[in-house]
């Protein structure tokens, strides 16, 4: 039986009864889930709870004869039940001692618009908005809350950071409906957050949105009082300001700290958190300008403000300095603000990584980021949602892995990608052990394969500008987004060392020295940091151009091998049909990437493939 279609959970199919509408606290749901799971297997095992409110989200599990005892706070007990079930399904040993999340705030950012569209959504329309209002199936929202709770996600921001009308009414006339929606998710330990438009006072009769204006401050305070009276456990606000034409404090010659602190002070009496996105850059750059370097932007703007933000402000920083590319270095801003609470932002929606058509398992990427950055650098994690109205929630049935894994990494940032992927496979499909291993292997290698046949060696931005899917090596080259590769007949890449744009100098010394040297720089980031001739010798002795050719031929062949491997799996329907159909699209995409990128660089370099493989004129 499939574990991912219809109104079931995207994993844990033995939880095959919908949570009844009347259950309004985590303990009731925990008891229901334990009963459902153990009855489904006819095991006769019992589960007992010990409630310790002070433990909150924490829990401990111990064996008790043939059964189990789970102790913790109300939400902690619920998390403990899901951990117990996941562990049994995956064949894992139970965790010892008290378990608590490493990051207190583990948030999903949804880019849902109230007309029902989802910006960069690849799994269908919004699950809860349509025609400018809330429009949802309460049973499906309960299933979503259950799914989020089953991997320990505790905050859901329900509207797009690019706030479009009539989303501003979520803070006034639609507040009763926000409360109804929040009430459905509350028993699962999931709190709502709302994206707000910095210029909202202008839309409500004021002549300014200047954060230093007393009338503006009072307006936000009054709004906060109304909002938290209606939704007393609202987590807070998420803000995108002065970025990609969104309004912000720069219009009033105010700093981002002044803008964020004004909002933070309005919501602080209610326990609200102000999450302020650090995704700010000049999106109207002249391509002729070789001095401005977009990756520098966040550091240049925010690092001087370290220590200037109020304590309930969390600065949300994308893991890389660009925008969720296939390969980027870790953002230098994550090293540079020790006095400011930071949230690390990932993207589950595969905007630049295959649109939930091509396979791209994200845990290996997260492992690299956390290992380089240091998990202690941030106090929260956030991820752009990959959820949608499609029957399986995610478009591709395997894309569920990324939400599953994100939740686990919020609890344990030291998690092993291989074990996380294997756990998802075992929780999701009843397959022979050899087939489980095959699927896990395909998923584990999917990021490397995708990287090989797309943008080479950290170049970034070689996708079609309109869709962000498929190859277009010069698609962004003469546009205003500051995303250039500068390829010509002499070489490719941008010098971001001290002699170039200086971006590499934003890193701590140990990393700046690595990135500054072509010989020391990791191959995967070589063209991100350096402009090199096609004859440059890589660490393994190959020339740069030969490495580009080899990667693209290998990546395409690996995609074809993945296709053959998936055909051998006895996946349930409709998952099998959907996975194979999308795999067909992926192989076509990989072939297109291979031929376009190899031809692009052969035309510039004039150098043939040493192995004599077909490259087009």
Image (cartoon, rainbow, N blue to C red):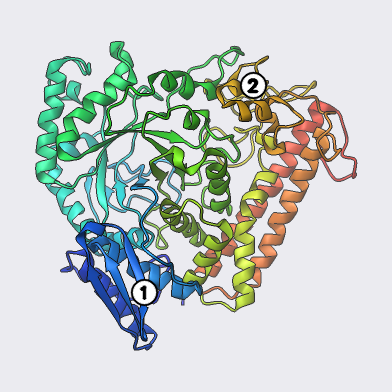
Compared across the picture, whether 357 is left or right of 340 comes to right
> In this figure, what is the number of numbered marks?
2
Report the residue that reaches farthest toward the front.
97
Q: SS of the residue at dot 2?
A: loop
Q: Which residue is drawn at the image coordinates 33% and 39% (left, top)? A: 160
Which residue is found at the position 31% from the left and 53% from the top? 127
Quarter assignment of residue 497: top right
- Side of 434 relative to 547 (left or right): left
Give the structural element (helix, strand or loop) at label 1: strand
Quadrant housing residue 82: bottom left
In percent of the image, x 57 and y 26: which residue is there?
507
Q: Residues within 10 Å of mark 2 (few under 14, many from 20)?
A: many
| Whole-percent x, y for residue 240 in the image | 34, 30
Q: Quadrant of the C terminus?
A: top right
Point out which mark residue 496 bears: 2
Please give the name of the residue rendered at 17% of the width and 23% of the height, measured from the top-left corner. 201
Residue 180 at x, y percent in the picture = 15, 53
| Residue 133 falls left or right of residue 413 | left
Marks 1 and 2, the one that precedes in the sequence? 1
Q: CA distance from mark 1 to mark 2?
A: 53 Å
> Of 50 and 276, which appears nearest the observer?
50
Residue 7 in view in this figure: no
| Residue matched to label 1 | 62
Q: Position of residue 51 (x, y in %)?
A: 21, 67
């Amino acid at each position: 039986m499939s574990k991912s279609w219809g109104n079931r959970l995207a994993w844990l199919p033995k939880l095959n009864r919908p949570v009844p509408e009347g259950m309004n606290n985590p303990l009731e749901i925990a008891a229901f889930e334990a009963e459902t799971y153990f009855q489904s297997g006819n095991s006769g095992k019992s589960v007992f709870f010990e409630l310790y409110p002070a433990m909150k989200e924490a829990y401990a599990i111990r064996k008790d004869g043939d059964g189990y005892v789970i102790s913790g706070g109300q939400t902690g007990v619920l998390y403990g039940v899901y951990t117990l079930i996941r562990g049994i399904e995956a064949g894992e040993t139970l965790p010892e001692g008290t378990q608590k999340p490493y990051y207190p705030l583990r948030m999903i950012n949804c880019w849902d618009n109230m007309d029902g569209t989802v910006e960069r959504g690849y799994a269908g329309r919004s699950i809860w908005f349509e025609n400018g209002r809330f429009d949802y199936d309460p049973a499906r929202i309960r299933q979503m809350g259950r799914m989020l709770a089953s991997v320990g996600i505790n905050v859901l921001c329900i509207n797009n950071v690019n706030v479009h009308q009539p989303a501003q009414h979520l803070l006034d006339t639609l507040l009763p409906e926000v409360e109804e929606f929040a009430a459905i998710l509350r028993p699962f330990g999931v709190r709502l957050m709302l994206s707000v438009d910095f210029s909202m006072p202008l839309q409500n009769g004021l002549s300014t949105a200047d954060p230093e204006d007393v009338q503006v401050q009072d307006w936000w305070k009054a709004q906060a009082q109304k909002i938290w009276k209606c939704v007393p456990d609202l987590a807070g606000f998420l803000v995108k300001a002065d970025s990609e034409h969104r309004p912000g404090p720069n219009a009033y010659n105010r700093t981002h700290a002044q803008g964020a602190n004004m909002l933070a002070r309005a919501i602080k009496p209610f326990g609200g958190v102000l999450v302020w996105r650090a995704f700010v850059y000049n999106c109207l750059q002249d391509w002729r300008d070789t001095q401005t370097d977009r990756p520098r932007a966040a550091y240049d703007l925010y690092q001087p403000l370290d220590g200037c933000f109020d304590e309930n402000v969390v600065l949300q920083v994308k893991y890389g300095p660009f925008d969720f590319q296939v390969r980027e270095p870790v953002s230098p801003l994550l090293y540079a603000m020790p006095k400011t609470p930071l949230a690390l932002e990932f993207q589950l929606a595969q905007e630049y990584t295959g649109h939930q058509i091509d396979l791209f398992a994200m845990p290996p990427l997260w492992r690299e980021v956390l290992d380089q950055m240091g998990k202690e650098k941030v106090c929260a994690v956030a991820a752009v949602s990959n959820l949608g109205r499609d029957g399986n929630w995610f478009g591709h049935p395997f894309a569920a892995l990324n939400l599953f894994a994100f939740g686990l990494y919020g609890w344990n940032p030291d998690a092993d990608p291989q074990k996380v992927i294997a756990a998802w496979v075992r929780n999701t499909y009843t397959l022979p052990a050899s087939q489980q291993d095959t699927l896990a292997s395909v998923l584990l290698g999917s990021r490397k394969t995708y990287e090989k046949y797309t943008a080479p060696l950290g170049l970034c931005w070689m996708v079609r500008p309109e869709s962000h899917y498929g190859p277009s090596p010069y698609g962004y080259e003469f546009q205003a987004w500051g995303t250039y590769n500068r390829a010509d007949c002499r070489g490719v890449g941008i010098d971001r060392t001290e002699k170039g744009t200086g971006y590499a100098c934003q890193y701590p010394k140990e990393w700046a020295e690595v990135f500054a040297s072509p010989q020391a720089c990791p191959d995967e980031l070589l063209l991100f940091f350096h402009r090199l001739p096609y004859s440059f010798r890589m660490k393994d002795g190959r020339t740069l151009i030969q490495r580009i050719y080899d990667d693209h031929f290998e990546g395409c062949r690996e995609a074809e091998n993945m296709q053959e491997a998936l055909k051998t799996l006895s996946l349930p329907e409709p998952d099998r049909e959907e996975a194979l159909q999308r795999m067909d699209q992926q192989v076509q995409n990989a072939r297109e990437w291979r031929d376009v990128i190899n031809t692009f660089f052969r035309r510039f370099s004039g150098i043939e493939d040493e192995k004599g493989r077909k490259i087009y004129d």
